């Protein structure tokens, strides 16, 4: 073993350098090689900053999308609009810079400030163009960057938009009932003796006409008329009671009234307080619910005393169902990192069925656990809570990095509409790190340290419908892989496929610098293998391969970082956690794969058996009866033998089909199931050769054989024929 490799092995095993010197300071200035392209993030257009519009439907938009929409409206296409576009993008970049520096404000405010800062003095055309774009913004609202404050701001805005819409619907219903119940009472009063007295009749006429009538005579005349029906005493009391409850309710603000002014608050600092408030308000809630239902019946004239009186008499807090609660505001709890409640109490609250919408903000995935150095927790409190919440069955769970929140906006809204508890577990790094918050969050998701997923109990009855591995890059792989281009020692461009692993994510955090040992190009040797290769087959003999990740310095010079064993073990744990999520998402499902292997083995065994029986048959027929093989005594399994095939003709080995739906989803007319629910080619001409090849590539048991193309005019045939070769 050469000296360099020996030093690398020692570091890998011990986390210490042979010379006793630490390289932590050197490593702290590095970043993963795949992140080199994002060094100047503000100059790149991406999802952030975002604008909270306050609208119920599109409550959040990216700044770039907003500027693009405005530009489409005002900038002429082609060269004519180029100057305007350039100016608008210059202002947009300045807003990004300001937001990254911590400035807050609405889009209009930030736009105006940015225009002042970047417009060349006296450039009237610049100001005019910027004004045109501003006038065409589809929405305005607070602008937010991807920083530590984002999870709470995002959820609060989304929740407010949902509650605003709920309040609008509720107010419409309540106000309409109040008016119609009032009409019932007014009509009843108009028929009463009190309404026919002289002062009441006089008051009901306008002052201009009062002198024209004798109200005494009118009162006498009307009072002698026979009674004309009217409300019975019980009904009037019911209507008055319902009306009083509807008017006094404190769950929804009146039109034009701000939330909180006389109405209940629904945002709490912890789940315990939210639960206590829910319980305390439950009697009031059930009274309002009862009043709403009774009022509906009254205005429709459908209240039947014999039927409804006993039902409403028994209606109390215990009668309130989860569906009833959908009508009412939900309780929001935003737990900042380290806040109390992200533990057993919170799990209890989520399992209570109360419509709590809880945000758990994870901000440290690399915190060292109590087990000692190198044992990372992967934001375990948040992820464990998410797993526990999924096990309750009726809790909506969403986990995501902050950088992915815009992409998840509809899912967030779905969780807030969910009739029951919802947990939002979001990772956003603390502000002030060496790497921008957006990149840290994106790296956490990319490296599987904090993968995104949702569990939506309302999406269907089974796990396949409920669980989704949202937006994770290349979800079928252990680690996503990207091409990295760099110059080799001869200054030739080299492109290498590089995986982004948990160890790469750790490079972003200065606290982990001690787990890496920089190896400049001069000492790169055969004994070094990528972290991905090491994890594919963790070596028992460290000399067989020392794992490294690629990093770049401030000048984008490439180096390898040898990774110590502790961090590599943490990466393995991270991968195991990702495998568990993959299984939940139906990717590399170990049970399904085991079943497939069993079925394949059984099929091969059956085929062997048929072949052996066919070979032995003549001998058995001519030999003595006692010499008949045992196998002949047992009837072989009935296996439909596939006919001999012409390899140029497409076909499916139907008996081996595992009914995975892949091909039938690609083209349900080309592929169909037989009575046995196994696929065959129903109509070759109903699709293209491309679809046939894609189906062959998707087929989990490789039983689709595409043969040769039948339409020589189909585009891209050369490439497709190449792709079809492995399945011939
Ligand atoms: S893709 Fe393969 S296994 Fe799946 S249904 Fe089609 S033929 Fe059967």
Image: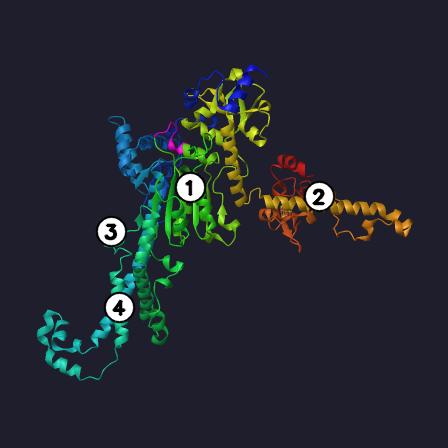
Q: Earlier in the sequence, mark 4 or mark 1?
A: 4
Kind of element beneath mark 2: loop
Residue 378 position by quadrant: top left
Is disc 2 surrounded by few (<14), some (14 to 19) or many (20+) residues within 10 Å? few
Q: Which residue is mark 1?
A: 382
Is disc 3 surrounded by few (<14), some (14 to 19) or many (20+) residues within 10 Å? few
Q: Earlier in the sequence, mark 3 or mark 2?
A: 3
Q: Nearer the viewer, mark 4 or mark 3?
A: 4
Instruction: Indicate the position of residue 213 as horizontal and vertical percent values.
Output: 11, 77
Please tell me which residue is depicted at 52% across the width and 15% down the height of the picture. 522
Question: Most extreme residue toward the front, as rendered?
Answer: 371
Q: Is residue 279 above or below residue 389?
A: below
Q: CA distance from mark 2 to mark 4?
A: 80 Å
Q: CA distance from mark 3 to mark 2?
A: 72 Å
| Mark number, residue 649 | 2
Q: Earlier in the sequence, mark 1 or mark 3?
A: 3
| Mark number, residue 308 | none
Instruction: State the residue in front, 200 or 112.
Output: 200
| Mark number, residue 241 | 4
Specify start and end residues of the magenta stretch as a single range.
432-439
Q: Which residue is mark 3?
A: 258
Kind of element beneath mark 1: helix
Q: Nearer the viewer, mark 1 or mark 3?
A: 1
Q: CA distance from mark 1 to mark 2?
A: 54 Å
Left or right: residue 408 versus residue 713 is left
Instruction: State the residue in front, 549 or 403.
Output: 549
């Amino acid at each position: 073993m050469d000296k360099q490799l020996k030093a690398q092995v020692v570091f890998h095993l011990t986390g210490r350098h042979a010379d006793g010197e630490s390289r932590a300071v050197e490593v702290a200035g590095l970043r993963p090689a795949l992140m080199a392209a994002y060094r100047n993030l503000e100059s790149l257009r991406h999802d952030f900053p975002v604008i909270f519009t306050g609208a119920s439907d599109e409550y959040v938009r990216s700044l770039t999308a907003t500027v693009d929409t405005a530009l489409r409206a005002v900038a002429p296409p082609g060269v004519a609009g180029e100057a305007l576009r350039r100016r608008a993008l210059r202002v947009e970049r300045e807003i990004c810079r300001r937001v990254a520096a911590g400035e807050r404000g609405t889009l209009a405010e930030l736009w105006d400030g940015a225009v002042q800062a970047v417009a060349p003095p006296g450039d009237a055309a610049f100001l005019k163009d910027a004004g045109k774009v501003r006038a065409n913004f589809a929405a305005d609202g607070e602008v937010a960057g991807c920083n530590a404050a984002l999870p709470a701001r995002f959820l609060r805005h989304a929740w407010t938009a949902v509650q605003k819409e709920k309040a609008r619907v509720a107010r419409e219903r309540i106000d309409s009932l109040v008016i119609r119940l009032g009409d019932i009472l007014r009509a009843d009063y108009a028929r009463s003796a009190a309404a026919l007295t002289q002062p009441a009749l006089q008051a009901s006429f306008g002052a201009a006409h009062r002198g024209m009538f004798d109200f005494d005579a009118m009162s006498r005349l009307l009072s002698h008329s026979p009674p004309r029906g009217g409300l019975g005493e019980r009904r009037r009391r019911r209507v008055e009671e319902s009306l009083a409850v509807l008017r006094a309710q404190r769950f929804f603000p009146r039109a034009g009234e701000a939330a909180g002014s006389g109405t209940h608050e629904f945002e709490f600092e912890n789940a315990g307080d939210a639960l206590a408030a829910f319980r305390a308000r439950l009697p009031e809630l059930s009274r309002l619910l009862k009043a709403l239902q009774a009022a509906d019946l009254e205005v429709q004239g459908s209240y039947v005393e014999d039927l409804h009186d006993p039902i409403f008499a028994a209606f109390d807090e215990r009668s309130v169902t989860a569906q009833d609660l959908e009508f009412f505001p939900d309780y929001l709890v935003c737990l900042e990192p380290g806040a109390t409640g992200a533990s057993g109490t919170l799990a209890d609250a989520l399992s209570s069925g109360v419509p709590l919408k809880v945000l758990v903000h994870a901000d440290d995935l690399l915190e060292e656990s109590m087990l000692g150095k190198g044992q990372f927790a992967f934001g375990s409190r948040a992820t464990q809570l998410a797993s526990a919440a999924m096990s309750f069955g009726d809790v909506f769970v969403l986990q995501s990095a902050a950088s992915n929140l815009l992409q998840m906006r509809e899912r967030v809204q779905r969780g807030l509409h969910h009739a029951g508890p919802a947990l939002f577990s979001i990772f956003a790094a603390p502000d002030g790190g060496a790497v921008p918050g957006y990149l840290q969050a994106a790296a956490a998701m990319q490296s599987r340290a904090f993968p995104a997923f949702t569990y939506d109990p309302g999406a269907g009855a089974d796990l396949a419908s409920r669980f989704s591995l949202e937006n994770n890059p290349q979800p079928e792989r252990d680690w996503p892989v990207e091409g990295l281009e760099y110059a080799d020692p001869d200054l030739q461009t080299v492109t290498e496929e590089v995986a982004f692993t948990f160890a790469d994510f750790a490079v972003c955090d200065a606290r982990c610098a001690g787990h890496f040992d920089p190896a400049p190009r001069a000492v790169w040797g055969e004994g070094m293998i990528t972290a991905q290769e090491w994890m594919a087959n963790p070596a028992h003999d460290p000399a067989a391969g020392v794992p490294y990740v690629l990093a770049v310095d401030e000048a984008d010079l490439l180096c390898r970082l040898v990774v110590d064993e502790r961090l590599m073990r943490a990466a393995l744990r991270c991968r195991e956690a990702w495998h568990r999520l993959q299984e939940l998402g139906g990717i590399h499902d170990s049970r399904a794969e085991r079943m497939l292997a069993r079925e394949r083995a059984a099929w091969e065994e059956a085929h062997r058996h048929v072949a052996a029986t066919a070979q032995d048959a003549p001998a058995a027929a001519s030999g003595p009866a006692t010499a008949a093989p045992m196998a002949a005594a047992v009837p072989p399994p009935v296996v439909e033998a596939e006919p001999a095939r012409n390899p140029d003709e497409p076909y499916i080995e139907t008996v081996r089909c595992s009914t995975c739906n892949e091909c039938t989803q690609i083209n349900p007319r080309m592929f169909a199931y037989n009575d046995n629910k196994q696929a065959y080619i129903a109509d070759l001409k109903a699709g293209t050769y491309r679809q046939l090849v894609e189906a062959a590539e998707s087929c989990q048991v490789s039983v689709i054989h595409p043969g040769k193309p039948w339409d020589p005019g189909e585009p891209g045939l050369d490439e497709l024929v190449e792709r079809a070769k492995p399945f011939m």
